[in-house]
Amino acid sequence: MSEKSVDSEGTGIYEELRPLFFPRSVAVVGVSQDLWKPGSSMLRALQRFGFPGALYPVGGRGGELLGLQVRRSVGEIDDEIELAFLFVPATVLPAVVRECKQKGVRGIIAFTSGFSETGTEEGRALEAELVKEFDGSFRMIGPNCLGVYSPAGGVTQHPGEGYPRKSGEVAFIAQSGGLSEDFARSSPNFGFYASKVISYGNACDLNEADLLEYMEADPDTGLIGMYIEGPRDGRKLARILRRTAAKKPVVVWKGGLTPQGASAASSHTGSLAGSIEVWEAVLRQAGVVQVGGLEELLDTLAAFHFLPRHTDLRVGYVCAGGGTSVAASDASYRAGLTLPHMTAPVHDTIASLLPPVGASASNPVDVLAPFPSPTVLKGILEAMAGSGEVGAIVIDRIVMSTELRRLMKYADQTATEDEEWLSEVPITIQKDFGIPVVVVLREHLDPDGDVAVEGERIRLRRYYQEHDIAVYPTADRAFRALGHVVGYYRQVERRAGETA
């Protein structure tokens, strides 16, 4: 595969891999009358997900399934097939791939396991036999994978009929099937949606470098996350990572860096994981963002989604509690950010809004109790946002809705006429001052586990996300994600200056 730069005008790898993400027709090979079997459940998932093209089930017994005629072989299908999903035993997979190739199928996703990941001579021999079929006339994902989720193309992974139909700007490339499913299902709760998600398994043909090259060219993808265990072509991956990261943020979680993780990676996809030192150097030189888990990866992609091109290290922090202030100061420092002290005029304005004893008007601002009035909270945020002394504001440990205060039984808080607009304050500040506002909505707020409290927190989280406010469950996670964004964009600016 050529590594020349490509565009999205139907050239290069973008057009070559189109049938995997936007197929006009799909054959599902390996169906049976048992709807719980993988092939049959995949066919049902595609129907329920809303695949807009032609579907052709293929099974040795023929008949009818889910209202569709079942062909006994791919060769029996009269129409052109762009993409084939293969759910057949490992021992016959090479022969079925050969049949697909003879039919002129352009894309194949092989879900079957039982190859090099088994660590057996038999598995490695089967994989070697499979690779002999690759002649450039088609491209394949897998084997040992869950496939592709492309909501705009009407394609879903196995067994993802319940995945979101809405398409977004974030792509995720994963060697793991389970992690790709977790990503697709979890991302809306972090405030963004996926453009594409790929579980690529053993990478006998298409590997992480090829898929990254596609996402580099994909106009629908603005952010890229990756989970890698062991690359097939490390040098090529490093080159494409560096090239792509100069255009779009790339967030990489490298699995298998511990001895235990390396062993698990080998048994999972037959990958050689590599050393921590080598990988950290490769990723650092490529200019990508390195994370250590799925939670951090999702947090970071959410920060990139809500805070595009943010480079300011200075953060204003408003909270309730002195210990909270100290913990946040530590967290911001670890993230490479600063909490600058406000100048005297700003400090005095904030101080005039706070109780004379117990609160703090510096930065961090401690409002003392987690239920300031909307007028007080708005005044504090306006003073910070209008000062020019911070580039973003984080609000933490403030109960941000009247209903949540009621549910949490703050009985001494009498509702006032203006309290209904409490939740609107962060949205108003971000809109009026053009400064990013991040809200921390802590979990486990009710000692009795009242589901109504959790329901209101989730409602509020989604409300803020719909209004372009980033939301995190802890200040530590908020600062860490924000630090990744600032670090990435400052690095992009620095490298651009070096090459100017």
Image (cartoon, helix red, strand yellow):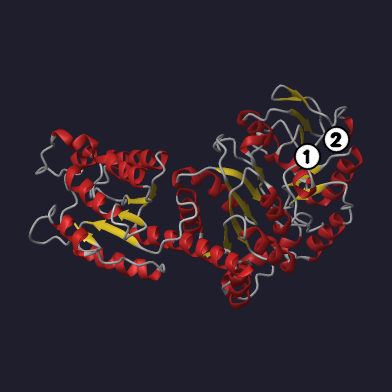
Kind of element beneath mark 1: strand
Give the class, few, some or many, for how many residues have Cα within 10 Å of label 1's Cα (few <14, many ≥20).
many
Q: Are marks 2 and 1 in contact (CB under 8 Å)?
A: yes
Q: Name the kind of residue labelled 1 in the image.
A: Ala
As drawn, 225 above or below 74:
below
Left or right: residue 443 compared with residue 108: left
Instruction: Say whether residue 168 is visible.
Output: yes
Q: Nearer the viewer, residue 60 or 341?
A: 341
In percent of the image, x 73 and y 49: which residue is there?
112
| Image coordinates for residue 92, horizontal then vertical, percent | 84, 48
Where does label 1 land, which residue? 84
Residue at 60%, 57% in the rendered image: 226
The C terminus - image quarter:
bottom right
17 with respect to 35 (left or right): right
Whole-Å distance between the Cαs marked 2 and 1?
9 Å
> Image quadrant of residue 468?
top left
Q: Secondary structure at mark 2?
A: helix
Decide: is 281 above or below 162.
below
In the rendered image, residue 354, in percent from the top left (x then y), is placed at 13, 54
Q: Nearer the viewer, residue 407 or 32?
A: 407
Residue 86 can be seen in this image:
no
Frontmost residue, 106 versus 271: 106
Q: Quadrant of the N terminus?
A: bottom right
Which label sits on residue 74? Answer: 2
